[in-house]
Amino acid sequence: MASLRVRIHRTVSWFLVVSFFGTIITGYGQTQNWFKNVYTLSKVHRIFEWFFIALLLYHAVYTFWKVKIKTKKLVSKIKDGRGTAINTLRLIQKITSWFTLVLTLLLILAGLNGYVWFAKIFETVIPFA
């Protein structure tokens, strides 16, 4: 059985996946006029959006401080030929997670631009605001 630390990480990850798909589906539903009541759909989308942002922050912080997959250790293990397949996959996972995090933050910034207060604050900093 997995440790409590791993179970918490997995649980938060699955909630993150659900909130991600909820945000994407409701956002796409708004643009494609899938639902008659756009106001309710917009509110549900904003709820999913804020849950997604909160869960993503928690997940990232928890991953960096508790799970602690060290890049230097992975590279040295791969160089030494120890557990090369699993360590290579972990290194690829680490690299792709950084790319995913950057792209997700850009999407969050674009979504937050829908708030007037956000757009006014960052209009000179963020090019699409």
Image: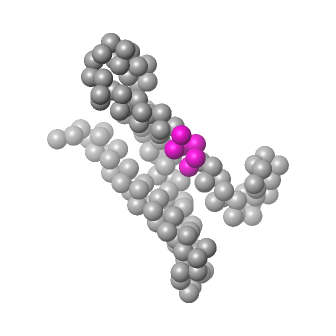
Question: Magenta residues?
Answer: 99-104
Q: Residue furthest bottom?
A: 36
Residue 96 image position (x, y, % from top left):
47, 38
Residue 110 image position (x, y, % from top left):
66, 56
Residue 93 inside the magenta-drawn segment:
no
Query: Is residue 57 something one can see in this rendering?
Result: yes
Left or right: 3 as drawn, with respect to 26: left
Residue positioned 56% across, 87% down in the render = 36
Is residue 123 placed above or below 41 in the rendered structure?
Answer: above
Closer to us: 76 or 108: 76
Query: Is residue 121 something one can see in this rendering?
Result: no
Q: Main secondary structure of the magenta part?
A: helix
Would you identify the image quadrant in which residue 129 lies?
bottom right
Residue 103 inside the magenta-drawn segment:
yes
Is residue 52 placed above or below 30 in the rendered structure?
Answer: above
Residue 38 image position (x, y, % from top left):
59, 81
The N terminus lies in which quarter of the figure?
top left
Is residue 18 placed above or below 85 in the rendered structure?
Answer: below
